[in-house]
Amino acid sequence: MSARVITRRCFLRGLAASAAAAPYVITSSALGGSGKVPASERIVLGFIGTGLRGNQIMPGFLGGGAECQAVCDVWENRREAARQRVGGGCTAYRDFRDLLARADVDAVVIATPEYWHAVIAVAACQAGKDVYCEKALSITVAEGRATCRAVDRRRAVFQHGTQQRSDGRFRLACELVRNGRIGRLHTIRASVPVSSATAHRQPLPVPKELDYDLWLGPSPWIPHRGQAGIGHPGWCFRSDYSPGFILTWGVHHLDIAQWGHGSELTGPVEFEGRGVFPRDGFDDAVLTWHVECVYSDGVRLVFTSEDEQPNGVRFEGDEGWIFVSRGTIQAQPDSLLKSPLAPGDLRLYRSDDHAGNFLDCVRSRRPTVAPVEVAHRSTTIGLVSAIAVLLRRKLRWDPAREEFPGDQEANRMLARALREPWRT
């Protein structure tokens, strides 16, 4: 777009500037009275994707000076349920492009299936919106980089849905590692749940509530086989839509591995993996896997499914180890967790409310705890791991150029063809 979209905040500032020209009345609530956020600081949100994940995260964004004026879903019943849940003047849309055309929407929350994330995030930035996007950022490295360019070009505020960055246990583990409390870090182990698969699925009538062509979007056209359903095993384990839990779940712990290692803006330089795939059926994502990655400093990242090692991230050094997962943090020696950080020690970005951090940054224009470049780098490790498992051979990776040097076969797997008319 050639002109920046006028947001609600800009519009309200324009009203304030016209005060001398015409008298008007401002209510106490507009000024922030009775504990309310002033109108000039309120954020108008649009929610794109109101299925399982969208409904889970929606409450965290509402209140605290944010209001939802638009919801969007290709399922009529889901978008209508979301509209009624929000109430007020909320409008429901079938096509996200109609939502993005609204000048009063300041920011969007994207909670669609993964194969849509990059396309919608790029379009949202082009429409002048700030973006909260659920994980993983993309299903190809090329689309992730396109999202980074769009965010940077439009100077959008971006938050990735890797909520563990707003969990104090994960932050503490990473701070202890980066301050040398386990000595020299030599190995990181990350493990997440295994994927699953379903048998052959017969073509099914398209439900009347569903715009199936819009649901497919940039992915290849195939007959409807129930993949548009919520959760698992809907779309998550077919490569047209996602590489499976090696990415969907994996990005959470890979993000923490990067944070603790201090490599959030780069990545490993070598990958080698193996895995077990479904023999037949609709789903084709890797079920279980073992991937070994090496960073340029020699630190090893061992990334596996949960059948090999506990779900979580374990940092191993020559003087101890720290294991962290959702709800638990352990260390050896135990005293590691009881020794406070010194005044001069490195402190990581503190966020205790992931949605709240995004809203605060929309107001302040500061970076979020999970900005787009960090999101892309964490997502890339999952994507390159999936490629290594498919090819079953050692791969060299150049994180600066984002390519496999001299390996045409692997490089062809860094992008996908998008169905018309979709672009990133």
Image: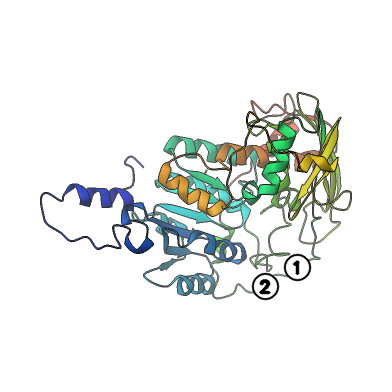
Q: Mark 1 sits on what residue? A: 201
Residue 355 in view: yes
Per the image, label 2 sits on a secondary structure element best described as loop
Q: Amino acid at mark 1?
A: Arg
In-front residue for pair 282/121:
121
Q: Quadrant of the N terminus?
A: top left
Rendered residue at 62%/53% (across/down): 114
Mark number for residue 276? none
Q: Position of residue 353 (x, y in %)?
A: 56, 53
Asked if disc 2 and disc 1 are in contact, CB closer than 8 Å, the reply is yes
Q: Position of residue 125 (x, y in %)?
A: 45, 45
In-front residue for pair 262/78:
262
Please tell me how crowded label 2 is: few (under 14), some (14-19), or many (20+) other residues with Cα within 10 Å. few
Using the image, determine if residue 113 lies above or below residue 397. Answer: below
Q: Mark 2 sits on what residue? A: 204
Res 379 → quadrant: top right
Per the image, label 1 sits on a secondary structure element best described as loop
Q: Position of residue 304 (x, y in %)?
A: 83, 46
Residue 389 in view: no
Is residue 412 left or right of 294 when viewed as pictured?
left
Between the C-alphas of marks 2 and 1, the distance is 9 Å
